[in-house]
Image: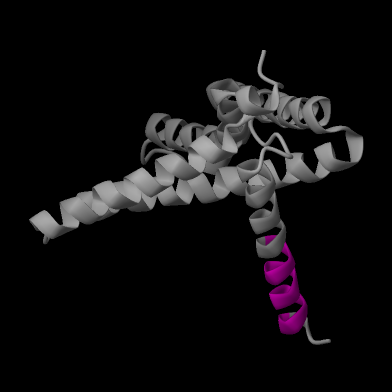
């Protein structure tokens, strides 16, 4: 197998596993997200680095290289430290809740899938907002936005199934 074929295989396997996870959540056989707090721990893995990067770039301004500022200046080091702590705790919380809800073997799979789902949710949310605020917006675009937003909300409702599986606290 070539490297490109191997990458394509991983995409197919990843996509198939996410589809199976969605079907498992839809039939309430697997608890994906216990509640919105569980979802927020997964999303914090994506948004924490973005927020921290924005803070470092904003505080450093044009005066310094952001990487040098983050690693050599005390304020940058504090931001980097809290980012690492938040991401570490988010990872632990994501996997802990997945294992508690689904058992060890399935929980590790679900925890990893939750990280992928968080990335997909982030990109979809950003794309939806960009779609709504594009330059040539028409009434049809707003209607399509609300249809896509409704589908997006339904998918999230399916994935947040802790109350239906009896795992919600």
Q: Quadrant of the N terminus?
A: bottom right
Q: Is 41 rendered above or below residue 151?
A: above
Residue 126 visible in the snapshot = yes
Does residue 2 sit above or below 57 in this rendering?
below
Between 32 and 115, the one nearer to me in the picture: 32
In the image, 76: left or right of 109?
left
- Asked if residue 9 is among those painted magenta in the image, a careful observer would answer yes
Residue closer to the observer: 14 or 22: 22
How far across and how far down the image is residue 78, in percent? Answer: 60, 21
Res 135 → quadrant: bottom left
Instruction: Give the percent coordinates (x, y) of residue 164.
Output: 63, 27
Residue placed furthest toward the bottom:
2
Q: Indicate the position of residue 90 as horizontal and vertical percent values.
A: 68, 27
Residue 121 lies, with reference to residue 45, above or below; the image says below
Residue 88 among magenta residues:
no
Most extreme residue toward the front, as rendered?
27
Towards the viewer: 50 or 107: 107
> What residue is shown at x 24% (from left), y 56% (from top)?
144
Is there any visible trace of residue 65 in the rendered image? Answer: no
Q: Quadrant of residue 75?
A: top right
151 sits to left or right of 114: left
Q: How is the image coloured?
A: one colour
The C terminus, quarter of image: top right
User: Going by the image, does 39 lie left or right of 145?
Assistant: right
In the rendered image of this protein, does residue 5 appear above or below residue 108?
below
Q: Magenta residues, as a range?
A: 4-14
Main SS, magenta region, reads helix
| Residue under the point 75% across and 39% down | 111
The structure residue drawn at horizontal position 41% and vertical position 40%, both measured from the top left corner, is: 153
Q: Position of residue 165 (x, y in %)?
A: 69, 28
Residue occupying the point 63% across, 32% down: 33
Q: How many marks?
A: 0
């Amino acid at each position: 197998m070539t490297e490109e074929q191997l990458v394509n295989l991983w995409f197919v396997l990843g996509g198939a596993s996410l589809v199976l996870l969605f079907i498992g959540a839809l039939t309430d056989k697997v608890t994906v997200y216990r509640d919105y707090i569980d979802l927020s721990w997964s999303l914090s893995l994506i948004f924490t680095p973005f927020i921290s990067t924005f803070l470092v770039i904003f505080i450093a301004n044009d005066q310094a290289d952001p990487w040098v500022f983050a690693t050599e200046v005390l304020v940058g080091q504090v931001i980097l430290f809290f980012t690492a702590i938040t991401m570490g705790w988010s990872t632990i919380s994501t996997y802990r809740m997945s294992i508690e809800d689904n058992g060890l073997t399935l929980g590790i799979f679900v925890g990893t899938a939750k990280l992928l789902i968080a990335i997909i949710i982030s990109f979809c949310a950003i794309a939806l907002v960009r779609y709504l605020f594009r330059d040539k917006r028409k009434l049809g675009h707003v209607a399509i936005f609300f249809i896509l937003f409704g589908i997006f909300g339904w998918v999230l409702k399916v994935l947040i199934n802790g109350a239906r599986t009896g795992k919600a606290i």
